[in-house]
Image (cartoon, rainbow, N blue to C red):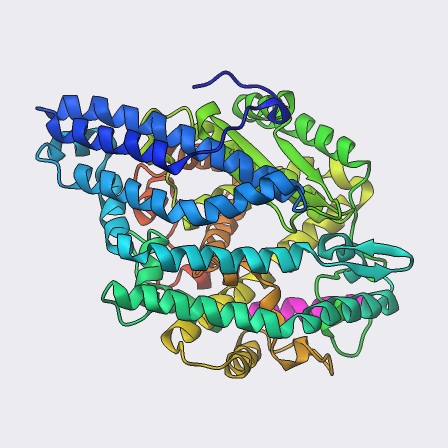
Amino acid sequence: MAEMKKFKDLPYQRVVYEEVEKEYRALMDEFKAAKSGEEQFEVHKKYYALSNRTTTMMTIAQIRFDINTEDEFYGKEKEYYDEMEPKLANLIVEYKRAVYDSPYREYLEGKIGKVAFKSMELELKSFDEKLIPLMQEENALITRYDKIIAGAKIEWEGETLNLSLLRPYLTSNDRSVRKKAYGKYSAFFLSHAEELDEIYDGLVKNRTEQARQMGYENYIELGYYRMNRNCYDKDMVENYRNQVKDYFVPFAEKLHERRRQRLGVDKLSYIDTGVYFLDGNPKPIGTPEEIVRSGQKMYSEMSAETKEFFDFMMENELFDVLGRKTKKAGGYMTSLPEYGAPFIFANFNGTSGDVDVITHECGHAFQGYLSAQDPIQEHWDITMETAEIHSMSMEFFAGKWIGLFFGDRAGDYKAMHLEDAAAFIPYGCMVDEFQHVVYANPELTPEERRQEWMKLEKIYRPHMDFEDDPFFGKGGYWQRQHHIYRYPFYYIDYCLAQTCAFQYKVMMDEDYAKAWQSYLKLCRLSASGFYTDMLKEVGLESPFEDGCVRKIIAKLEEKME
């Protein structure tokens, strides 16, 4: 691996497609000419190096653009990669086809594993060179959406805020402030409604055409392949959603009713979403820098492994968490494989969400730090329903140290976090079912899509009342969920992972050390096994199993009482 430096000092050089193509072509020739599995594996190590270098440069460019979406240089790099990335993906698929068809497959499978070959099979089913123009168009549409969201300029009492910086006012303990903030929030989306509809309509039609060119009826099958669903299908996901409807929705509605009573309102309104206490939600104490330092103390005490990880992150400044007006909204963890380094991007805004970055995103980053030590890089390619277990479970493991962040309101935060996590699952399943409806019926008009969303709201969130809001009240709430635009079919992974994280919560309350060892084992397994098999190996039950959700609800109801 390359010598690590502070992120701001990492060198950047554009990945020129024509140069990389020559390297990949030479690599493929060398791989095919190899006379044994041992020789091919040595060539495969060169593929690791090439892939790491190109991915790292492209990721640095993406992060630096996200940090300042008005940066002219990295804005042009982003546009270049939107065009180049599908062509590079085609090269990688060509190389993987050679690996998949290798006469020495048995030897290679012994080295990189059966999961790697199953993932290659799905990748080959999901990509073809003829799709490149459509994929370039898809990237451009997503970038348009991102720019609209990042470019929000909302006037608020003499300030100009973006959507992330408006967030504290959406959860203010003053209901009149929340009402005003939601009015501004809704007005922003309403002012862009026509373009948002146009972009999403373009994405649905584009993805449907990609699927049809690959011989599929609609995008659902192709979407599952692209999400690398290598051990479950849409019928198993539907069965899970049905369990959520039967057990989680009624449980979540009880939680919402309890919240309504705490807030002292006659009926919950959409402006009360995410507000848990009459005197306001617990807020983190200290400056952003102090919050990060509290994170360092927590991870230094949690385990030797987490201490090493967080010290590495701090030493190399692998965080960009301060909210700024030209910064992309949201947060994520990504990796710089050439350095074996995770990177965390976020927008601190003074809410409890700032601490969630130190727990959730650091859960991703901790696992990424561990997996980077595995020389078999196919094990790094974690499917999302597994990756989100690492992050969502870390939120619960951090509970022992939550007083560092919230002081005397630590108990309130724990109660809020548990309720919020439980109430999320119905919403996440609604997002997933909505996408299944949309891609099964790509001819739906924007208005018909909004009607479908409103039908699902009544099933999954019957308490929700959007009153007379001109945007959200007309079925537009989903358009604020960037996953629907950018990552089709991703959202159910959060629900599956949260279901597993609740199992860790139950386990750690009974035996924290046992739960931690199970979690650490899951992190180290990475993608070396299939999702459902790895769950069994670490003592978790698959969310797809009938009865799993019901048992979790029974345990959670005990806790709530």
* Residue 499: percent from left, percent from top: 48, 55
* Residue 474: percent from left, percent from top: 64, 81
The answer to which quarter of the image holds residue 272 is bottom right
Tag count:
0
Q: Say which quadrant the C terminus sits in.
A: bottom right
The answer to which quarter of the image holds residue 47 is top left
The answer to which quarter of the image holds residue 8 is top right
Q: Is residue 297 magenta?
A: no
- In-front residue for pair 399/433: 433
> Going by the picture, which residue comes out furthest to the right?
158
500 vs 395, left or right, is: left
Residue stretch in magenta? 251-263
Q: Is residue 261 magenta?
A: yes
Predominant SS of the magenta segment: helix
> Going by the picture, which residue comes out furthest to the front?
18
* Residue 441: percent from left, percent from top: 39, 78
Is residue 249 at least partly visible in the picture? yes
* Residue 180: percent from left, percent from top: 84, 69
- Above or below residue 362? Residue 495 is below
- In-front residue for pair 551/75: 75
- In-front residue for pair 240/386: 386
The residue sitting at 56% across, 44% down in the picture is: 76
- Above or below residue 495? Residue 324 is above
Is residue 517 at least partly visible in the picture? no
Q: Say which quadrant the N terminus sits in.
A: top left
107 vs 266, left or right, is: left
The residue sitting at 59% across, 69% down in the picture is: 196
The residue sitting at 74% across, 83% down in the picture is: 468
> Going by the picture, which residue comes out furthest to the top?
3
The residue sitting at 47% across, 51% down in the picture is: 497
